[in-house]
Amino acid sequence: MEKKNIDWSNLGFGYVQTEQRFVANFKNGQWDAGGLTTNATIEMNECACVLQYAQTCFEGLKAYTTADGHIVCFRPDLNAARMAESCRRMRMPVFPEDKFVEAVVETVRANAAYVPPYGSGATLYIRPFMFGIDPIIGVKPANEYQFRIFTTPVGPYFKGGVKPLTLRISDLDRAAPKGTGHIKAGLNYAMSLYNIVDAHEQGYDENVYVDSATRTHIEETGGANIIFITKDGKLVTPKSDTILPSITRRSLLQVAKDYLNLEVEERPVALSEIGEFAECGLCGTAAVISPVGKIVDHGKEIRYAGMGPVIQKLYDTLRGIQMGTVPAPAGWIQVIE
């Protein structure tokens, strides 16, 4: 497969239109067979449910070229399961999980020329999403839905080396108890847009949200889960019903236990204890782990080691699994070609 003439090393994390995308429609109580199309335009009524009441959810995963030249995806079955949970919570029809994985494979295979070569630092980002498409004016779920997957080549999260992030404790809330914080719904991210722009304007890279009920425990940031490393090398990550269950975080916990023999603890993390940790990182699809240099809590600075030794090992090991240089646990790698 001849690759597209793209300057892979200078790609940013943005949208580059590729040739094929997958589309399936839900109507009269059932999904059609779906298939690939070259049409990147969505047509819908001005009263479409998604435009009125934000009935939409999405996923994000990547395809890679491994060291031995294969194109692979990382744990797409978990993305399928998480999207199914999002759909159930949003009163949307579940796109069958096996069909989800098949559609991911089909879409990536159709855009194989856009999968960056091994060693370029770039990957093919995959965005499955679903939305209510028929006209709805009363406050209720849609009757018809569209499921789509598009792909776009993206550059690495870190440009020109690792730069530890500066975070702030947010005064605004991300999610309410018994709300939708645990699913990947568009509305959750819409709520964070004001706050992330404000953070950037104030010189911060991201917001750290605390629980909205008591404002005493760390939850996550606007776009990633958070992990801490204790001074004796234990991995600690917050546990809460309003945190999005990150597939990267889940994988890192297993890597920590099974590959690095680290002690792992999922538990509520008090805001008052974050100064006791040695390392801190944000984990997600975009960068595996982004090191944190400091968290600012209303003028009080808590500093960390940045890309410290434990976070570096976690990053190297999981990245190696994804790139095919470290043996992967059974079922983690979906080979596409």
Image: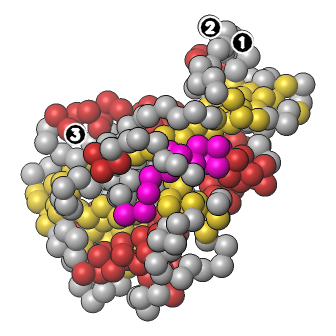
Q: Check if residue 326 falls in the magenta segment.
A: no
> Could you tell me how far apart the alpha carbons at marks 3 and 1 are, in whole angstroms?
36 Å
Residue drawn at the location 30% of the way across and 86% of the way down: 233
Sooner in the amino-acid sequence: mark 2 or mark 3:
2
Q: Position of residue 226 (x, y in %)?
A: 37, 62
Give amino acid for label 2: Glu
Element type where label 2 sits in the image:
loop
Amino acid type for the residue under numbered disc 3? Ala
Q: CA distance from mark 2 to mark 3?
A: 33 Å
- Give the quarter of the image for residue 51: top right
Point out the stretch of residues depicted in magenta: 107-119
Q: Tell me where residue 98 sits by quadrant.
A: bottom right
- Mark 1 packing: few (<14 Cα in 10 Å), some, or many (20+)? some
Q: Where 93 sits versus 259, above or below?
A: above
Instruction: Please rate how many residues cluster around mark 3, counting C-alpha atoms within 10 Å: few if below 14, some from 14 to 19, many from 20.
Output: some
Residue position for label 2: 46
Image coloring type: secondary structure
